[in-house]
Image (cartoon, grey):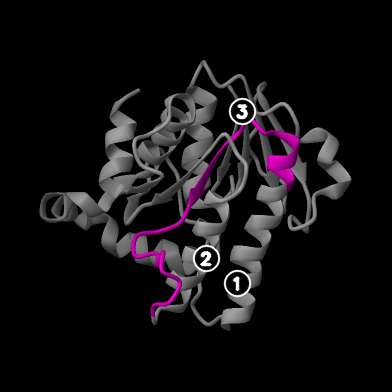
Amino acid sequence: MRVILFGATGMVGQGVLRECLLDPEVVAILSLVRGPAAQRHAKLREIVRQDLSDLSAIEDQLSGYDACFFCLGVSSLGMAEADYRRVTRDLTLSVARTLAGQNPGMTFIYVSGTGTDSSERGRSMWARVKGETENALLDLPFKAAYMFRPGFIRPMHGVVPKTKWLRRVYAVIGPLYPVLKMLAPKYVTTTECVGRAMINVARRGAPKRVLESQDINAACREG
């Protein structure tokens, strides 16, 4: 399997990249990032682009891939809706349309979040925008598209959140993971499980097109 990965420097993307590098059936990974990463591996190739919303200059390098794992995202905190929609919905769909044109047999997996609003009419701004993005992706002509909606994600194997404020949050909440897992197992997962689930779903599909944390954990165990 040949994979394109977006967001490899973020917390989720770090975990997904790790699992792709470890999986013998993933033979090539193309990582598109805004800044160079420290990771080096024989089956990993990196393209650095400041503007990921326009991939026209590198379209010829984006064909021949079986899956795209789209882990790129930003927090909506302090953002106006128009700005959040531009960097969430518009960028994602620009990338996805380009990839669908180059790889009609591709499986596209998008990391959204628990609470995403598929109706696009709720009060929560981020949930509406994520819902718009999911619905538009599901309409694109991919072989298959899946929306991952994890809740609390436990970083593992040295994976760390990219931003300082998230690192502080996880420093406080992290030790509570065993309690969260016991009290609310349907809403917690790990970076390892998200990565394994993506690979398994890209390889074999899934009974649902929208996967919550419990579905992600189930797909993780199928490997």
Q: Amino acid at mark 1?
A: Arg
The amino acid pointed to by label 2 is Glu
- Mark 1, residue position: 85
Q: Earlier in the sequence, mark 1 or mark 3?
A: 3
Closest to the camera, between mark 3 and mark 2, is 2
Residue 21's x, y, as percent? 54, 26
- Nearest the eye: 38 or 133: 133
Q: Earlier in the sequence, mark 2 or mark 1?
A: 1
Q: Amino acid at mark 3?
A: Asp
| Mark number, residue 132 | 2
Looking at the rendering, in which quadrant would you find the N terminus? top right
Q: Quadrant of the image for the C terminus? A: top left
At 63% from the left edge and 29% from the top edge, which residue is drawn? 105
Between disc 3 and disc 2, whose residue precedes? 3
Q: Are marks 3 and 2 in contact (CB under 8 Å)?
A: no
Asked whether disc 2 touches disc 1, contact meaning CB atoms under 8 Å apart, the reply is: yes
Q: Residue at x 40, y 78 (%)?
A: 124
- Drawn side of residue 219 relative to residue 119, left or right: left
Q: Which residues are magenta?
A: 98-122
Count of marks, rendered view: 3
111 falls in the magenta region: yes
Q: Residue 89 in the image: x percent, y percent?
A: 60, 64
* Residue 154 higher or lower than 170, as above or below: above
* Near-viewer residue (148 or 193): 148
Residue 66, label in figure:
3
Tag in front: 2 or 1: 2
Q: CA distance from mark 3 to mark 2?
A: 25 Å
Q: Is residue 51 left or right of residue 131?
A: right
Front residue of 14 and 199: 199
Q: Residue 154 location in percent, x, y?
A: 33, 49
Per the picture, the main secondary structure of the magenta-coloured stretch is loop
